[in-house]
Image (cartoon, rainbow, N blue to C red):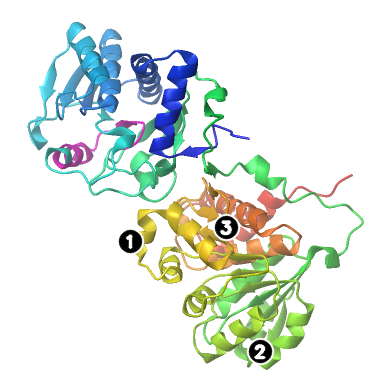
Amino acid sequence: MTIPSRSLYTAAQMRRIDAAAGATQGLDGPALMQRAARAAFDALCRRWPQALRIAVCCGAGKNGGDGYLLATLARQAGRDVSVIALAPPADSHAEAAAESWRAAGGFVHPFAGEHSLPLADVYVDALFGIGLNRPLQGAAVQIVDALNATGVPVLALDIASGISADTGASLGSCVQAAATVSFIGWKRGQHTGAGLDACGDCELAPLDLPETIFEEERAGAHLLDWDVVRRRLPPRARNVHKGEFGHVLAIGGDHGMGGAIRLAGEAALRCGAGLVSVATQPEHLSPLLAARPELMVAAVAGPQDLDSVLARATTLALGPGLGQRSWGHAVWHRALGSDKPVVLDADALNLLARHPRRFAVPAVLTPHPAEAARLLASDTASVQANRYAAAQAIAERYHAVVVLKGAGSVIAAPGNGVAVCPWGNAGMASGGMGDVLTGVVAALLAQGLDAWDAACLGTAAHARAGDIAARDGAGLLASDLFVPLRRVLGGGPRG
């Protein structure tokens, strides 16, 4: 079922939805533009109620038309309003909107360089909207750079100019908005990559359209809904024992890298795995047991030492601190040969890129952009240019569920749509966070969730725990997530 408030659409899909609104609701372009302008002006008034001077920067298309109509509403409300036109209207609806502005007594000032922006309490970005698919050039770059240089809040209409509505990638210079009002539905580019910072605080303005207009348009991407994903892990009955909740084997920690595998192992414990073993280099045995005695630590000098612990495990967490030397390669090969459900991270992914395979067992891959690039024999810039496509391509190539980490983590599965995680914060850009995520997802796999559900719930829980931990201030550590992870995944027993 389509849920418009969680669905993420491409620009082409939004154009078809606009057309459906006209065909089924009798709303022509000007009527929708008027609703959009009213919604945007209302948002501006809520966010900046003391703003008396408003400058609206209008482009030549329908986004510019929205801006002219917003300017008219603001003038009628007694605000001091200026309109700066990057180019004359090139669309009949935009021209009609500009005429409405002039009829209300307003003037249109052509953009005349970086020093021509008037002083304002709030600027409105009505330059390009969702149709832009190329880098900005010439005067467009100048006006965007001038807006960003003011230090004054910018409200973007539909999407920050210079951001791809489909991918969230920056198309060169882009507006850095304080807030964005997204008309009718969410755009994919607002929720991942560069689009997150450029669009600022996003709010959805459905424009009073019924949900029926979305019925013919399958979004193919959606925002994770916590209430939905949390229910995928059922509450526990009272009459249970540890053997019912899986046995995670965390494999990694080459010389000097014991901390990574300890983080993964403890995360699996904190997220409800019944038993957790760690297979690591012998030198890490004593430190791990001293730090976390609940972990069962096996000293593994070579792949032959792995067999006995592999036999007892139900789920593998493979990769944190693994390295790519002969030890890491040998235990990686032995572990994957067991055909057990597995989460792969870090050097387990780098080894997979060197020795590709398609998985016949439940598998979750958790690459950051550079690891994703290696998995695709590509480069990081190409991955970040379209995070949706990159995640889907990895899922298809390796027949696994993929969590492409980063701002707006993207989750993909073969033959399926994609999900985007709307939680997380910049403080989580620190060492060890990925190791914790590996343990979280492995614990959920061990408790019986399928790979997709484990990836979605694990990514959401990890990000939400990070948001809770970040409230205490700067210097967020990966291990700071352990206590809030228990809180977000908790729920207590039934009965």
Residue 197, placed above or below residue 302:
above
Determine whether, in the image, residue 74 is placed left or right of residue 368.
left
The amino acid at mark 3 is Pro
**Side of 372 relative to 285 (left or right):** left
Residue corresponding to mark 2: 300
* Residue 338 shows in this picture: yes
- Residues at badges 1 and 2 in contact (C-beta under 8 Å)? no
Q: Nearer the viewer, mark 2 or mark 3?
A: 3
Residue bounds of the magenta highlight: 141-160
The answer to whether 197 appears left or right of 148 in the picture is right
Identified by mark 2, the residue type is: Val
Q: Where does residue 298 sit, x and y in percent of width and height?
A: 70, 85
Which residue is denoted by mark 3 in the rendering? 414
Of badges 1 and 2, nearer the viewer stands: 1
| Circles 2 and 3 in contact, beta carbons < 8 Å | no
**Secondary structure type for disc 1:** helix
Q: Is residue 142 magenta?
A: yes
